[in-house]
Amino acid sequence: MALRTILTAPDPRLKKKAAAVASVDAEVRQLMDDMLATMYAAPGIGLAAPQIGELKRVVVLDIDREDVKTGPLCMANPEIIEASDEDVTYEEGCLSVPEHYSDVARPAKVTVRYLDRGGETKELACEGLLATCVQHEIDHLDGILFIDHISSLKRNMILRKLLKARKEKERDEAEGKPGTKLKMTAKEEAAEA
Ligand SMILES: [Zn+2]
């Protein structure tokens, strides 16, 4: 398993529509394993392939909360086949939108159909945080971020802050400040995995 770099907004690759996989072959299973490792290391509870620059319809999730414990879930070509009329609002965050959170309303219950890591077709009824998370991850496959569900005023403010933070980080790294060392360590680990 290899740790992959998570892209952060604004990045044009996060705005593209991902393509369905033909089947769950060894390459897709490797991608799923890399995504799980990258998600746990972040740490996060969900990750979609476009977030690591792979424009494939693959997502992974693992929710471990008091009310919902899923264990690792790998989904290829996931689609929502049923959604409740009733909405629920959660404060969402995203590994590609670091350190920013916002309330987003989505259907409270959904049923998702997907191919699992073994290539079998599965259907899963989701509610609570899992329902929100599944919809958030499937959005990524269509180039949609949670900030696309909020006002353009707030979205643009968040994007400006992310851009500023990235420039500061790049400047620090160019000057040899701590960030550089951390990045090298992550690369060394990835080479070993
Ligand atoms: Zn996300």
Image: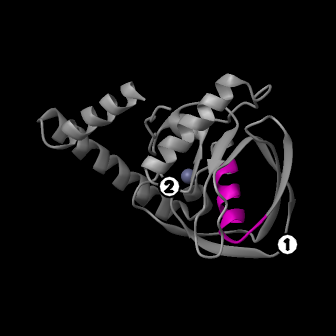
Please tell me whether the stretch drawn in magenta is mainly helix, strand or loop: helix
Q: Which residues are magenta?
A: 126-138
Q: Residue at x 62, y 61 (%)?
A: 149
Kindly identify the amino acid type of the residue bearing the numbered disc 1. Asp
Q: Position of residue 73 (x, y in %)?
A: 68, 50
As for residue 132 lying within the magenta part, the answer is yes
Q: Left or right of 157: which side holds 87?
A: right
Tag 2, which secondary structure? loop
- Mark linked to residue 85: 1
Q: Position of residue 80 (x, y in %)?
A: 82, 53
Question: Disc 2 beta carbon < 8 A from ligand 1?
Answer: yes
Tag 1, which secondary structure? loop
Kindly identify the amino acid type of the residue bearing the numbered disc 2. Gly
Quarter-of-image position of residue 174? top left
Quarter-of-image position of residue 126? bottom right
Q: Left or right of 108: which side holds 141?
A: left
The correct choice, above or below, for 7 with respect to 45 in the image is: above
Mark 2 and mark 1 residues within 8 Å of each other at the beta carbon: no
Neighbours of disc 1 within 10 Å: few (<14), some (14-19), many (20+): few
Q: Left or right of 100: which side holds 31?
A: right
Alpha carbon separation for disc pair 2 and 1: 28 Å
Q: Say which of 119 and 18 sits in front.
A: 119
Q: Earlier in the sequence, mark 2 or mark 1?
A: 2
As for residue 183 lying within the magenta part, the answer is no
Q: Residue at x 65, y 23 (%)?
A: 27
Q: Say which of 116 and 136 sits in front.
A: 116
* Residue 106 in view (yes/no): yes
Residue tagged by mark 2?
Answer: 44
* Total marks in image: 2
